[in-house]
Image (spheres, coloured by chain):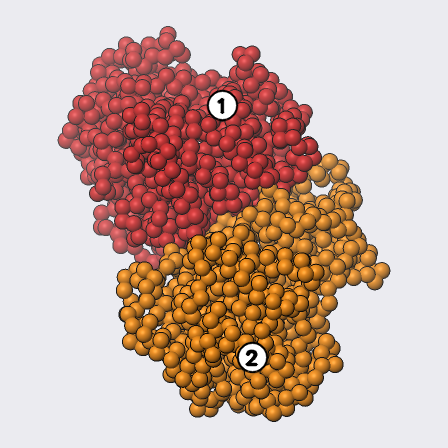
Chain colours: A red, B orange
């Protein structure tokens, strides 16, 4: 389900009231080579339950799964639709199934001699945050403790299990029932933690493991006393009471705040419900012939087809992930720097390892995907506790997908669906080591404007960036916001950080175009270019939205670590030359130098994968590029043309300032004569630049957009440059200032720009058309086939395009005549970026041969959200769930998408074969690419480094919703 | 046909090719009590021809019209569809009809003894600029001259007629045939004029009339020599050749550049064609028993039911209007200051006057409207040359309409249709005397932002305006652009003039709200507040659009007089205290004090007329008002509620600065605590103000819009005020500057404003809602019935309105409880001013009880035209015919109207009885009001002084397109 469906059900926070149709069968058994359910029953049994059933019961598998049962998701739905009651007969069913487990295990629930303990876990169709996870050791009571001590011969283990049960149960069951959200600061969990810390302090020890059996026994007693004080009732000592308490807590957690918020965002229906899994406990901590571990059927970091895992002797599952003891490798392939001296499972328990290896192989073959498995060895007996499709990084995802096709394990379509766009992106950029990031608190969070990670010394001006870089230093350019004059410095820097601006601000656009790491709109930072300092942890009036927007709680960890969300982050001042690290894929800013993972991507692998995608997709992919270098780069990624070549961009970041200087001269011209002169001067530069790019794109179409931005953007801001310019125009500095001021606008985005310049200064359109068409004619004469498409920007009326088209057609006729070439192919089209243009698309298509959606501006004007200013409120809109996503990042299908659809429909009504593309930033964003596919666009165009992403997304879109014109 | 249909046929510049169906009858006779045509045949005969036929032939009239005939418009269509050829047999028909005239007059065309002369005139269904007007004296040749001299005994007269024929004919027939547009600088007309000037110089005389017969004879000879040189052929000396040349020139002029442009703008189909009228010449200049004159059947300046006209003894028609001799009054009623000593026609030729008076009475009765007539007396014989519905000013229009209903001459519907909105507007404001304006060149032209005329001394700051006004001086406030801090000064001034800004700029909005004269966006003026000077005639880079936009030629006179269009206007500097005069209805700026016409409107008459409109219209009319005074004013004009009460406006121009100061304190608050404190402080002011306005509008709905504009707009710009503010907040000046800067935005119109403020600062919405609802509760307790409607501005998503509605409903519940009142009626609605809101209107209507279109912003964002910056290009768009009108003045039906229709349709789909209005500036613009009527809106809302205009427009809309829910 797409993210954009969120808004459809914002009010359905609980399941609809009234009774629910419920199947007679409410419980499904699994274990001991048998199962009533199977993997395909995820909707009914949840992911966890279905996988347990599959592992236990499928003829191909029949793995040793500790026996248990799953209460269906239907029961959860019934529970919420019937005032938190259970369907009739459920109690008896549970008892029946408990009995079945008792029979299989020979243990008895609540028995003093040979007690059965169970775990209780939630498990919906998809996992989601905020759900009650697990309660272990259910069934441990004053009565059953002695029996378990006798059976295990390990008093400490039993009391440790008991205190864990108490801590977990009191938190998620008792406190929840008392109406407190889990994790509350003043909650019971915090109190019990404190008591345990207190005991460690008294004993002078640091680790939990240093507490002995007596300590733990006393602690359990103290816990129960405190619980009585807080809740006014005893900690339940009846196994069945514990069991029902845990089951109820799972159902209750389905409607917890975080879970509901998450489902709203992800568009998950609230009536799915969660299942409950009740399963026999097995213990990996019953001494040295017991162990517990986790593994992957292939290496999730590299994709190599080798079993990869870690284990701990005499430990419980959570110890492996807790990081208190260093886990050992299961085999040689899994050995790391940390674990180089530890014995592998293969070495310590060769028989069990062989059995495990066989299981994992069987599982992968059966599931036809890399799996993440959990296992426990209890007294030399291996149990499989869980299996699910394993998480992997980008390189591993691509490698596995390709390897599995080769082995005919999966189809090409499946392989393409296995790699997410963000995984593919990992292959293109170095990234901050995720392990290091997990333990480091960022000093700020902004918008993820340019991908990958980078570190460098902070510099505050473009000039400094250039100078320091020349001295061989790695720098990050830090600015309040950037403007075109900063481009040289941006290129010299490793990455760019700005305090203002949105996903389509100048910095973001430029950085993304280069595939350069960039974080923008970091509104909690105060950047002072004068004193060359960054102050972090500042919550200003315009930006205190972040600090205030504390509800609903942040949904994922990194958010929660955001300094802007936590008043506790101290004010901190960084100076010029201080090291900072950026994660441009997530928007985090860190102090200091963080370890990086080199992209070191396997180009060959990337190319193979993209070729696969190309064989599937219907939507074409072009690139937004303004230089021959960028164009060639994108072409190597597979771009099928240029969808956006911005004439004005050619004047920046070129090394030589001469063309820019001449452009500025043109802009501040006062009389038609001055302007004519400046245009003549500018002409050769423009023609040469266009020619170079056209040549690089030989054989492919190149859409060249006529000058677009407000002229004032080009006027230099630095005094020195202003003086130089004034001199060259033989006017005074004051006169230049007056001219420059007359170009200043209150709302430049809606000002004198785009086609409006072409209307008031037809000679500027004429010059640009001539440069494009003469460059074309000259290349054609050299035998180089080029296909220019001239695009008119910022159009709102049919008359505008007619006016401009006339100029272009006339120039064409002149060029053909003067250059003595045969009539050649070129086309004239328009950007669709003004809401009105969508509504009159039928008229525009009368003369225009192609449309290209400029969805940045269309979003800007469709929402009335200034992309440069929306930082003051848009993050809060997303945080408060008023919008599913930043519409500058992910195309807003409901509103802006509607405009797109209207324009496509009306445009094609007039001109059936109208070529339609998109060249806004959305052209490289996966969800938006999918929308473009279904809206029937011919192509998307995006920054060179997003071309692979777009190619993959287009292929996935075709698989999900096949379109005819493949 | 509405103006908005213009764009439909922009390419049809000529008639479609191929043959045309043409009636057999191509010519219609008129004259001597007979006519083949009649008034209702305007499409076929053109307006002029149809009226001539009516006058000559209708049994009620049968006036003495010089005989002639009309070649139909079908012939013109044929001519253009058939390569400029005439239908077969036309030549013979023309000859036949010429013969008929010869028989009737006893004269012969081309006869040496008793020659017949004719005039040839164009005449389409509607008159339009750019058409060939008239060629007089056709048939005058070397051969016929002596005969005419004999007949008239006036050699000078005959040669004068001859040189006039040569000048006119060579210009409009010969030169046109040579492919030159009439009026060309290097054209033949200019050359002949120079030759005539040269002759006057040589003779040492100044006036044409001082040239004698011999001079004119020589001149005619010289003219013909020059013509031979220029065109390579003789001036035609054959009467029939002259006649056909003139007829062809009329048809040719149908496709002249100006005529085509005009038709495009006015939405007139290009296939109408023009008719040609050929009519016997009669001469008012045959001595003292001849005369010529013009008249109106009622006084066009006052509406009094008296024959009103002027005449000149021994003169030709053009002499009356040329202003060389002072015309005499036809009767005592027509006597003016200028003509007080001249003898009236009634005195000099009582018999003829009586005949004329009888004719004019007959005509008015027959046409049931005030007519404009032309007559000529040739040797004591009266001829009626033309009649048409007469132009009139506003007061006359209203008076005549009302008088004619009273006399049962016309129906109420007809009366309403007889008064144009701009005529009605004249009754509301003093105006610049049109006679004086006709002879004065403006120093600049801007946008007509506030109606009426005014003069005053130029002042350059709001403070100066207040100070000078206190000293009893009349001032005009001249600013680059205004901001809210100028409001006091704007109120003190007679009028406001700005160099920047569009029709919805701050100055325009405020002035219009007060009905105050205002001209904005005068981009050819350089306003320097520092040196306190205005420099006129400056053509800067950003504004040289005006100077460059010379094609197509300006369509109406005032445009042509615009200094911006004429490079010849000298640079001129005005200082503080210099007198200037503004025409705010047309946008002209004059140097010095111009005579004014007092509105002195007859309130009683206005009210009677509005009552008439009220009895007809379906669309309701509300007002945009922010103060009790304005509200009361609008209510007196007939406003049926307030459609827009802008909370933030209450803080300006109130005399006391205290509330504004408190608002500012709130805005620059940094912490929630500071803001809370500021809000509490502000609360009583807000509640009191709202209460006062609600009370004035007792019994009527009042829509109150929550705070809308970007906060930075409220921050003071003056250092003194900044310091005061900093002090009151106990922060440093620098700190305040930092806070203020953090509110600054790149594109504030699309920034942190409207509902976005309410989302990030819910407490601000809460406070406003409380003020509104407590004010309501308190008034209800006093027994005063009030109906507040709370309106959420700048909405783009459904989630926004849900978020805000929740706050408002909660406050309502609290107010009802705390104030101890019964549940009361109030509603919550939203502004529709963001394009996206139109597309999701169905979702918005789920919770919103009313919509109000904010078409200023909707136009702004729909077009991407910043209303503050569009001055740089929008005037040129209109001048170049890229847009039919400034869309901020007249709603763009094609694009923005489409958004409106989508929103209406989708909104009502969800909520059938959704109340929908418009509160943008378009709500008081006639064409837009008509659109709102047909789009099914419930009401329009406009500035108080536009309420009468809206009422009239609504009534006219209902008459033109009746709607059920009247």
Q: In this view, does A367 lie above or below B284?
A: above
Circles 1 and 2 on the same subunit: no
Residue at numbered disc 1: A654
Residue at numbered disc 2: B152
Q: Nearer the viewer, residue B923 or A386?
A: B923
Is residue B368 visible from the viewing direction of this image?
no
User: How many marks on residues?
Assistant: 2
Q: Is residue B146 above or below residue A604?
A: below
Q: Which of A517 and A902 is in front in this view?
A: A902
Q: Which residue is drawn at 57% across and 90% down?
A: B355
Secondary structure at numbered mark 2? helix
Secondary structure at numbered mark 1? loop
Chain letter of mark 2 equals: B
Is residue A331 visible from the viewing direction of this image?
yes
Please rate how many residues cluster around mark 1, counting C-alpha atoms within 10 Å: few if below 14, some from 14 to 19, many from 20: some
Is residue B230 shown left or right of residue B658? left
Res B841 label:
none
Q: What percent of the width, then of the height, locates residue B37?
A: 39, 82
Q: Quadrant of residue B469?
A: bottom right
Q: Residue at x 51, y 33 (%)?
A: A679
Q: In this view, does A282 lie above or below B295?
A: above
Please rate how many residues cluster around mark 2, counting C-alpha atoms within 10 Å: few if below 14, some from 14 to 19, many from 20: some
Q: Residue at x 53, y 80 (%)?
A: B151
Q: Residue at x 54, y 45 (%)?
A: A751
Disc 1 vs disc 2: Cβ atoms closer than 8 Å?
no
Q: Which of A596 and B467 is in front in this view?
A: B467
Q: What percent of the width, then of the height, locates residue A231?
A: 50, 42
User: Dividing the image into 4 quarters, which one contains the C terminus of chain A?
Assistant: top left
How far is the residue under mark 1 from the one under mark 2?
84 Å
Q: Residue farthest to the right?
A: B471
User: Dividing the image into 4 quarters, which one contains the N terminus of chain A?
Assistant: top left
**Nearer the camera: disc 1 or disc 2:** 2
């Amino acid at each position: 389900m797409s993210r954009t469906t969120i808004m459809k059900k914002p009010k359905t926070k609980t399941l609809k009231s009234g009774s629910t149709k419920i199947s007679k069968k409410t419980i499904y058994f699994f274990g001991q080579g048998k199962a009533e359910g199977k993997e395909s029953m995820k909707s009914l049994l949840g992911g966890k339950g279905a996988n347990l059933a599959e592992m236990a019961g499928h003829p191909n598998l029949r793995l040793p799964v500790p026996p248990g049962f799953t209460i269906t998701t239907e029961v959860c739905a019934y529970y919420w639709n019937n005032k938190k009651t259970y369907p009739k007969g459920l109690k008896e069913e549970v008892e029946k199934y408990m009995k079945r487990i008792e029979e299989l295990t020979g243990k008895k629930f609540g028995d003093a001699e040979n007690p059965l303990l169970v775990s209780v876990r939630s498990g919906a169709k998809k996992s989601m945050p905020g759900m009650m996870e697990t309660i272990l050791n259910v069934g441990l009571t004053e009565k059953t403790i002695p029996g378990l001590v006798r059976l295990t011969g390990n008093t400490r283990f039993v009391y440790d299990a008991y205190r864990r049960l108490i801590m977990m149960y009191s938190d998620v069951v008792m406190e929840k029932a008392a109406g407190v959200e889990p994790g509350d600061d003043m909650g019971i969990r915090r109190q019990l933690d404190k008591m345990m810390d207190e005991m460690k302090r008294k004993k002078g020890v640091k680790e939990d493991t240093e507490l002995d059996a007596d300590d733990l026994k006393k602690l359990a007693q103290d816990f129960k006393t405190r619980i009585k004080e807080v809740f006014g009732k005893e900690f339940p000592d009846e196994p069945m009471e514990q069991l029902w308490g845990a089951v109820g807590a799972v159902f209750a957690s389905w409607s917890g705040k975080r879970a509901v918020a998450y489902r709203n965002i992800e568009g998950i229906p609230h009536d799915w419900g969660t299942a409950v899994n009740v399963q026999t406990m097995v213990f990996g901590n019953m001494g040295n012939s017991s162990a517990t571990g986790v593994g992957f059927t292939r290496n999730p970091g590299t994709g190599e087809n080798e079993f990869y895992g870690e284990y701990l002797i005499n430990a419980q599952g959570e110890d492996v992930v807790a990081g208190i003891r260093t886990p050992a490798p299961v085999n040689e392939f899994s050995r790391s720097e940390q674990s180089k001296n530890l014995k592998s499972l293969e070495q310590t328990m060769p028989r069990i390892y062989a059995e495990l290896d066989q299981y994992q192989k069987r599982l992968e073959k059966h599931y036809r995907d890399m799996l993440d498995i959990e296992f426990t060895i209890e007294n030399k007996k291996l149990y499989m506790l869980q299996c699910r499709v394993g998480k992997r990084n980008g390189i591993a995802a691509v490698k596995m997908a390709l390897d599995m096709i080769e082995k005919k394990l999966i189809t090409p379509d499946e392989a393409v669906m296995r790699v997410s766009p963000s995984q593919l992106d990992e292959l293109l950029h170095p990234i901050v080591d995720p392990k290091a990031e997990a333990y480091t608190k960022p000093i700020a969070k902004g918008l993820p404007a340019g991908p990958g990670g980078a570190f460098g010394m902070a510099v505050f001006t473009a000039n400094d960036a250039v100078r320091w870089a020349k001295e061989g230093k790695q720098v990050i350019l830090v600015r309040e916001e950037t403007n075109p004059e900063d481009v040289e410095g941006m290129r010299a820097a490793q990455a760019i950080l700005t305090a203002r601006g949105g996903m389509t601000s100048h910095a973001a656009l430029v950085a993304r175009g280069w595939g350069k790491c960039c974080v923008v709109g970091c509104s909690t930072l105060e950047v002072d270019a004068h004193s060359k300092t960054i102050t972090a942890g500042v919550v200003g009036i315009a930006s205190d939205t972040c600090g205030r927007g504390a509800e609903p709680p942040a949904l994922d960890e990194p958010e929660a670590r955001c300094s802007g969300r936590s008043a506790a982050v101290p004010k901190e001042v960084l100076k010029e030359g201080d090291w900072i690290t950026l994660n441009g894929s997530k928007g985090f800013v860190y102090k200091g130098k963080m370890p990086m993972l080199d992209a070191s991507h396997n180009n060959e692998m990337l190319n193979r994968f993209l070729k696969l995608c190309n064989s599937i997709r219907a939507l074409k992919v072009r690139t937004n590029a303004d230089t021959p270098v960028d164009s060639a780069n994108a072409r190597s990624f597979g771009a099928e043309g240029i969808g956006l070549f911005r004439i004005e961009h050619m004047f920046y970041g070129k090394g030589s300032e001469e063309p820019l200087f001449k452009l500025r001269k043109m802009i501040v011209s006062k009389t038609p004569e001055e302007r004519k002169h400046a245009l003549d001067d500018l002409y050769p530069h423009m023609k040469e630049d266009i020619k170079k790019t056209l040549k690089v794109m030989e054989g492919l179409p190149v859409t060249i957009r006529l000058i677009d931005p407000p002229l004032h953007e080009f006027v230099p801001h630095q005094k020195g440059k202003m003086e130089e310019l004034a001199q060259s125009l033989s006017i005074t500095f004051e006169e230049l200032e007056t001219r420059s001021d007359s170009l200043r606008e209150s709302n430049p985005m809606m000002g004198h720009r785009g086609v409006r310049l072409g209307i008031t200064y037809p000679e500027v359109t004429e010059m640009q058309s001539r440069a494009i068409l003469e460059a074309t004619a000259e290349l054609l004469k050299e035998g180089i086939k080029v296909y220019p498409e001239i695009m008119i920007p910022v159009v709102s009326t049919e008359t505008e395009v007619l006016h401009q088209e006339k100029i272009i057609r006339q120039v064409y006729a002149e060029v053909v005549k003067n250059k003595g070439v045969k009539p050649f192919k070129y086309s004239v089209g328009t950007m669709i970026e003004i809401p009105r243009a969508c509504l009159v698309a039928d008229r525009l298509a009368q003369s225009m041969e192609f449309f290209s959606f400029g969805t940045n501006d269309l979003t800007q004007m469709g929402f009335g959200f200034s992309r440069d200013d929306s930082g003051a409120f848009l993050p809060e809109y997303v945080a408060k769930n008023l919008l599913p996503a930043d519409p500058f990042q992910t195309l807003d299908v409901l509103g802006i998408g509607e405009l797109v659809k209207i324009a496509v429909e009306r445009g094609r009504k007039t001109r059936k074969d109208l070529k339609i593309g998109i060249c806004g930033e959305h052209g490289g964003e996966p969800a938006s690419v999918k929308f473009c596919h279904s809206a029937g666009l011919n192509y998307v165009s995006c920054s060179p480094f997003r071309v692979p992403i777009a190619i993959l997304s287009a292929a996935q879109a075709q698989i999900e919703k096949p379109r005819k014109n493949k």
